[in-house]
Amino acid sequence: MRSATYNEFGKPTEVLSLGDRPIPEPKATEVRVKTTLASIHNHDLLTIRGKYGFKPELPAIAGSEAVGVVDAVGSDVKNLKVGQRVAAASVQATWAEYFVAVEDMVFAIPESLDDEMAAQLIAMPLSALMLLEFLEVESGQWVIHNAANGAVGKSLAMLAAARDVNTINVVRSKEAVEELEAVGAKNNINTEDEDWKEQVKTLLGDDKISAAVDSVGGQDSGDMLSLLGHGGTFAVFGAMSGKPMVLNPTDVIFKQAVIKGFWGSKLSQEMSVENKQRLVDELIERAVDGKLQLPVEATFDLADITQAVDGKLQSGKNGKVLLKP
């Protein structure tokens, strides 16, 4: 089968190539899926570089999320059948014509969702929904998060709104604000404005921020913490800047802040099937009723893998880049 493979860790455009690998056989609790479309995520690119929390054995096929059709089932599979349309995330080797995954990580997808939506429905939106529950925020409370125009950030803003949780979406440019407005997100703040922190306080009025999510690191972390309310939760989601967090210990102490690390893939793997199905059902409902929008930047043939993972395309994208095997 055709697959996007790499024999060493490194820059994706340099180490990835179109390869010919054997079609995998499902184990007892696994299903084999014939891939329709696969998503390219930032964590996939970090994995290829060898800089993610998980390192596959080399040589490896890249990718972690896809939509497709069940092609074969293992002897102990109970709830999925050959021919069923499914999506999977937090799995391995999805940038290929076929991939295998444990049944518990694969979910049936209704025909009402198109392939472009289904191919990216689980990983980032599920992370956003798990993040909301991880923060233990309730209707009417406020969450502030940076890098809000990313895939998780946009999903967080939309899914929180559907639960009547208020978000303050912090970004770094006017263009990023426009991206958020395009998906209906409100309370968008541009840090290019000198008074952006005052804008946040104006939005809040007499309310406080119950939770902050930092995806950037560096001084941006300290900015998020400085706006957090007393007794709030500070969740570390990522470090896009590549810099260590700069946190004022005074804020940590006197706000009595709770600082927690969030790793969506790990939580997803540890979550019960029933609980995860509950969240996936919510995602499907939001997507069908239009409360969750997942734009696509471009779709590439697997043979054009180096173009699909090009840094300029990935850094400037307004939607997900997809692969067609």
Image (cartoon, rainbow, N blue to C red):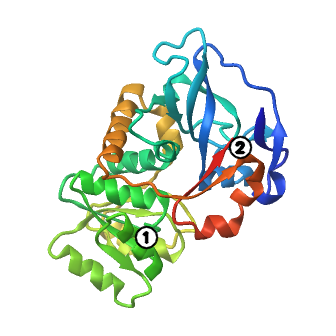
Q: Quadrant of the N terminus?
A: top right
Q: Position of residue 40 (x, y in %)?
A: 62, 51
Dot 2 or dot 1, earlier in sequence: 2
Which of discs 2 and 1 lies nearer the camera? The answer is 1
What is the spatial separation of the Cα atoms under label 2 and label 1, in whole angstroms? 28 Å
What residue would you read off at disc 2?
62
Report which quarter residue 154 is drawn in.
bottom left
Viewer-proximal residue, 53 or 68? 68
- Does residue 247 appear in the picture of this structure? no
Report which quarter residue 307 is drawn in.
bottom right
Residue type, mark 2 in image: Ala
Circle 2: element type: loop
Residue at the limit of the structure toward the bottom, as seen here? 194
Task: Decide if residue 35 is on the left or right side of residue 190.
Answer: right
Write the residue at 41% across / 75% down.
Answer: 178
What residue would you read off at disc 1?
179
Is 88 located above or below residue 244 in the figure?
above
Task: Decide if residue 160 is on the left or right side of residue 26.
Answer: left
Circle 1: element type: helix
Task: Decide if residue 197 is on the left or right side of residue 59.
Answer: left
- Does residue 192 appear in the picture of this structure? yes
Write the residue at 52% across / 61% down.
Answer: 319
